[in-house]
Amino acid sequence: MQNLAYKAYSTVTTRTASDKQIEYALFSEITNALKDVAAQDTPPPAVWAEAIDRNLQLWLLLSVDLLNPENALDEGLRGSLLTLAEMVRRVSYQVLAGETAVSELVEINEII
């Protein structure tokens, strides 16, 4: 039953939300998950890794879209965002290795 409700809601969302609204909602949801992890002294490893992985997936999808020749953004902006996506990837691996804090990823997402 819950699966049917999710499908129905998902269909309505895709028909009523603009691409910008969907992007904003995803960034917000994923950034909030990263904030939750950052606020905990010792978050469960699975929760911690999932939040970082979802953020990586988001930035990968953005990169693919930015590389699409039909992307309407200015070429300079696309290049800057692709550079930022690469930085997110590197910082994510630093976080996973314990070399930097999750708050670095939160900061990047909030700037966007």
Image: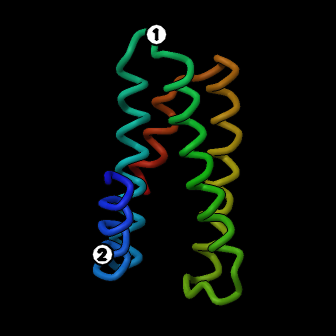
Q: Amino acid at mark 1?
A: Thr
Q: Is tag 1's residue or tag 2's residue first in the polypeptide sequence?
A: 2
User: Which of pointers 1 and 2 indicates the residue nearer the eye?
Assistant: 2
Residue at figure coordinates x 56%, y 18% from the top left:
45
What percent of the width, then of the height, locates residue 38?
42, 24
Front-most of residues 76 and 61: 61
What percent of the width, then of the height, locates residue 102?
50, 28
Q: Describe the element under mark 2 as helix, strand or loop.
A: helix
Q: Describe the element under mark 1 as helix, strand or loop.
A: loop
Q: How is the image coloured?
A: rainbow
What percent of the width, then of the height, locates residue 79?
67, 69
Cα distance between the residues tagged 1 and 2: 38 Å
Residue at figure coordinates x 66%, y 64% from the top left:
63
Residue carrying label 1: 42
- Do the residues bearing badges 1 and 2 touch, measured as CB atoms within 8 Å? no
Residue carrying label 2: 12
Q: Is residue 85 above or below residue 72?
A: above
Q: Amino acid at mark 2?
A: Val
Q: Is residue 88 above or below residue 75?
A: above
Q: Is residue 35 above or below residue 31?
A: above
Residue at figure coordinates x 32%, y 51% from the top left:
2
What is the count of numbered marks? 2
Q: Quadrant of residue 39?
A: top left
What percent of the width, then of the height, locates residue 73?
55, 82
